[in-house]
Image (tube, grey):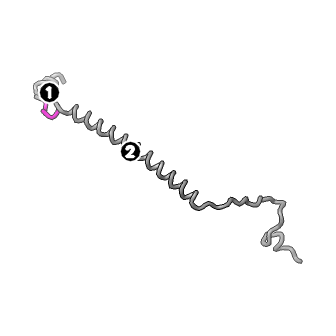
Amino acid sequence: MDEELRILNRIDLPPALDGLDDRILDALAARRLESAAIGRLMAIAAIVSLGGGVIAGSALPETAVAASPISPFGPAGALTPSTLLDAQ
């Protein structure tokens, strides 16, 4: 293994390795800028969708109607089994 390391030590490094660090750091900086832009776009999309919901909700105001309470002791419906089986 020592002989293999000596051989590797004698070989010149490719010139492309000199600029490798700079290329990696530039790519990381570009990715950081893209990430910030995506965050801003998501915030704008959320605000637009929320605003659209508020506008759509206020454009067609409808009065609120309370639902009738569901109770097992309420009046019997016309199609309940007890009324269908009743022989009157």
Relative to 42, residue 84 above or below: below
| Kind of residue indicated by mark 2 | Ile
Q: Which residue lies at the image location 33% right of the left edge and 39% below the top edge?
A: 33
Q: Which residue lies furthest to the right in this view?
A: 88
Q: Which mark is residue 8?
A: 1
Q: Is mark 1 on a helix, strand or loop?
A: helix
Q: Nearer the viewer, mark 2 or mark 1?
A: 2
Q: Is mark 2 on a helix, strand or loop?
A: helix
| Kind of residue indicated by mark 1 | Leu
Task: State the quadrant of the N terminus.
Answer: top left
Q: In which quarter of the image is residue 84?
A: bottom right
The magenta stretch is 13-17
Q: Residue furthest bottom?
A: 88
Task: State the quadrant of the C terminus.
Answer: bottom right
- Nearest the eye: 9 or 40: 40
Q: Mark 2 points at which residue?
A: 38
Q: Which residue lies at the image location 71% right of the left edge and 60% below the top edge?
A: 65
**Location of residue 53 in the rendering, given as x and y in whole percent from the top left corner:** 53, 55
Relative to 65, residue 37 above or below: above
**Location of residue 47 in the rendering, given as x and y in whole percent from the top left corner:** 48, 48
Q: In which quarter of the image is residue 63?
A: bottom right
**Location of residue 9 in the rendering, given as x and y in whole percent from the top left corner:** 13, 24
